[in-house]
Amino acid sequence: MPMLTLILLMIGLGIYGMATSRHLIKSVIFLNVLEASVILFFLRLFTSDPGAVPILNGNNGAYVDPLPQALMITAIVIGASVTALTLMMSIKLYHQYGTLDWKTLLEVEDRQ
């Protein structure tokens, strides 16, 4: 059960960090923490302890379902793409407005 507690603590840290961070790069980092903790949560949720690797060797015991792992690999790839896109947009915002502070960016947007 301590693993689940650590995962839930990481989820809380990611949500808290995204809600309170004023810097765009810090928000991206906390988004990655949240994403990684949700992936760990799903992998922990669908892992069966007595299961074996799903390779047919004549043994008809309990097997681990490979579908959750395949879905989480897809989520990792999508998360890396979102992170790259967000960092690219951060660079463009910094070149356009000279800051990455959320409050300043929203004030500049309101003025226009």
Image: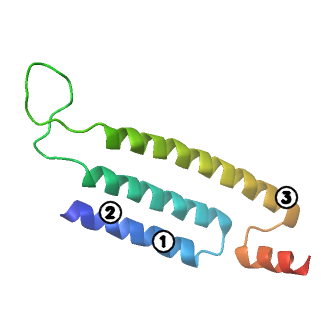
Disc number for residue 74: none
Which is more N-terminal, label 2 or label 3? 2
Q: Which residue position is annotated with label 3?
A: 95
Q: Which residue position is annotated with label 2?
A: 7
Verify CB contact (< 8 Å) between mark 2 and mark 1. no
Residue neighbourhood size for the residue with mark 3, other residues' Cα within 10 Å, grouped as few (<14), some (14–19), many (≥20)? few
State which quadrant residue 13 falls in.
bottom left
What's the amino acid at mark 3? His
Q: CA distance from mark 3 to mark 1?
A: 28 Å
What's the amino acid at mark 2? Ile
- Identify the element where label 2 is drawn: helix
Q: Which residue position is annotated with label 1?
A: 15
Q: Is residue 46 left or right of residue 107?
A: left
State which quadrant residue 98 falls in.
bottom right
Name which residue lies at 13% across and 19% down.
Answer: 57
Specify the farthest residue to the right: 112
Residue neighbourhood size for the residue with mark 1, other residues' Cα within 10 Å, grouped as few (<14), some (14–19), many (≥20)? some
